[in-house]
Image: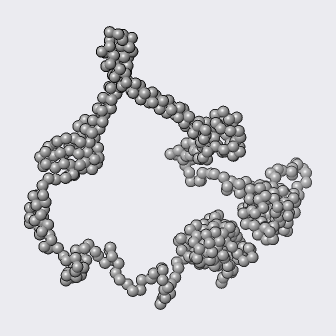
Amino acid sequence: MAIPISNVTRRTVYAPSGTGGAGPYAFTFEILANTDIAVYKDDVLLTLTTHYTVTINANGTGSVTITATGLALAPTSPTQYAIVGNRTIARATDFTTGGDFFANTLNDELDQQTIFAQQNAEGLQRALSAPQTDPTSINMTLPLASLRANKTLGFDANGNPALGETLGTNRGNWASGTLYYVRDIVKDTTNNNIWQCLTQHTSSGSQPINTNTDSAKWTLLVDAASATSSASAAASSASAASSSASAASTSASNASTSASNASTSATNAASSATSASNAQTAAEAARDQTLAVYDSFDDRYLGSKTSDPSLDNDGNALIAGSLYFNSVSGIMKLYTGSAWVAAYVQGVASSINFTPAGAVAATNVQTAIEEVDSEKLAKASNLSDLANTATARTNLGLAIGTNVQAYDADTAKTDVVQTFSVAQRGAVVALTDGATITPDFAAGNNYSITLGGNRTLANPTNIVAGQSGVITVTQDGTGGRTLAFGSYFKFAAGAAPTLTTTAAAVDDLAYYVESATRIVVKALGDAR
């Protein structure tokens, strides 16, 4: 029998409800047979009759009830059930020339074609697509599979698909029996090499990865083993060099002794000559080290200058902490990294000259200190010797309402009991309508939302125990909108409320936050 096909989305998602989560779960789109839908428990596709049964109403809508087998099917504690239109796309009716042309057959065929179109439209709503207002020059074709393998998808300056950089997730040390995904990054603890996964797999065997049976599924990013070998070889060379230097020192002493016995020690003299050559090499190295130390010192103490230098003695940039003696002023100066400042000055305080300013007329520090001391405010007076408080505030750079707050006995505090003599109100925060609505509990206590479709009120952000308020939910001019709830919302007997579906109907949800993951809600339905 033909039925009208409504303009609705052929997909409905529910949080578990009813006895043990069995339902029933209603769907508002029309079907022709109980095989026209697919039911998912989280991401698991359920099987008709085995896991659920379907009841079809006279108008083609209906409901799904989960069987005991379906409830026991993992996951046993689902976060949602999804009911999706899934009629097999085929055409079984064929009108022949001169044959029968019945209205009911045509209606069934048109109903079926409308269902197919709605199923495709629902699927396209969940796919990536360019806006209709994009330029006609946009090309949304992806790069070749061989080019985009192991790459991220991005967009170029024109908005066309483009290959992004290879990314990686640091999974720490490699371990056997672990599921690794493409681009995962691990460390081989036997040699500190860093590897990136090329093929998703569950690891097996043992380290090192380069000899593991799964080695072809990894690519080497950092060859730490080679670096370690090089470092070890360098350390061995350094040790050998140190031994050679010590031997050279000994040989030099032996060479001096052998010189006095040259007539009888020709063979020893030849050996000593070789040792002397080694000693010379060591001496030259010591000389070079000494020159390097001197150069470092020369870069830091620049000697005597007549003015602030801008470069060191080698013509290089100045180093913070450098010193030099100003022969004109007789002052040792220190370079801070950006300017030269006095490191110390000679003489007693009374002989240090400076330029007088303000009310100080003296031309040396000692006399200036005495003048300031005679004019200073007595510390014990606590500014009480100032006749005008407004002038005192001005002199101190203080302005009421700018950088100091005026005294107000009515200012409320958050850490003491308060008695208010006038009404106190919380502003109502308007939530943005969308498929998923996520309140920010730091924005206020009271919220409002007008539903423009079937929505989910997700777990709020910034949840703090002790907060309370009201969420006002209004149906739009069409009505019939449903509202699912995040897992943090708790209701009496565990049953989420059913909203009033009349157009422009208002339901109020009074809530209290018990903890960061628990919000108790009382529904005040059909407020009018």
The one of 3 and 120 positioned closer to us in this rendering:
120
Does residue 135 appear left or right of residue 126 in this picture?
left
Does residue 406 appear left or right of residue 516 in this picture?
left
The residue shown at (82%, 61%) is 72
The residue shown at (64%, 66%) is 458
The residue shown at (88%, 48%) is 97
Residue 245: x percent and y percent? Answer: 39, 26
The one of 255 and 31 positioned closer to us in this rendering:
255
Does residue 423 appear left or right of residue 399 in this picture?
right
Colour scheme of this structure image? one colour
The one of 333 and 250 positioned closer to us in this rendering:
250
Q: Quadrant of residue 176?
A: top right
Quadrant position of the C terminus in the picture: bottom right
Does residue 216 appear left or right of residue 325 in this picture?
right
Q: Is residue 230 above or below residue 262?
A: below
Q: Quadrant of residue 355?
A: bottom left
Quadrant position of the N terminus in the picture: bottom right
Residue 283: x percent and y percent? Answer: 32, 26
| Residue 329 shows in this picture | yes
Residue 164: x percent and y percent? Answer: 56, 43
| Residue 10 shows in this picture | no
Residue 131: x percent and y percent? Answer: 59, 53
Number of numbered discs overlaid on the protein picture: 0
Residue furthest out toward the bottom: 421
The residue shown at (68%, 67%) is 487
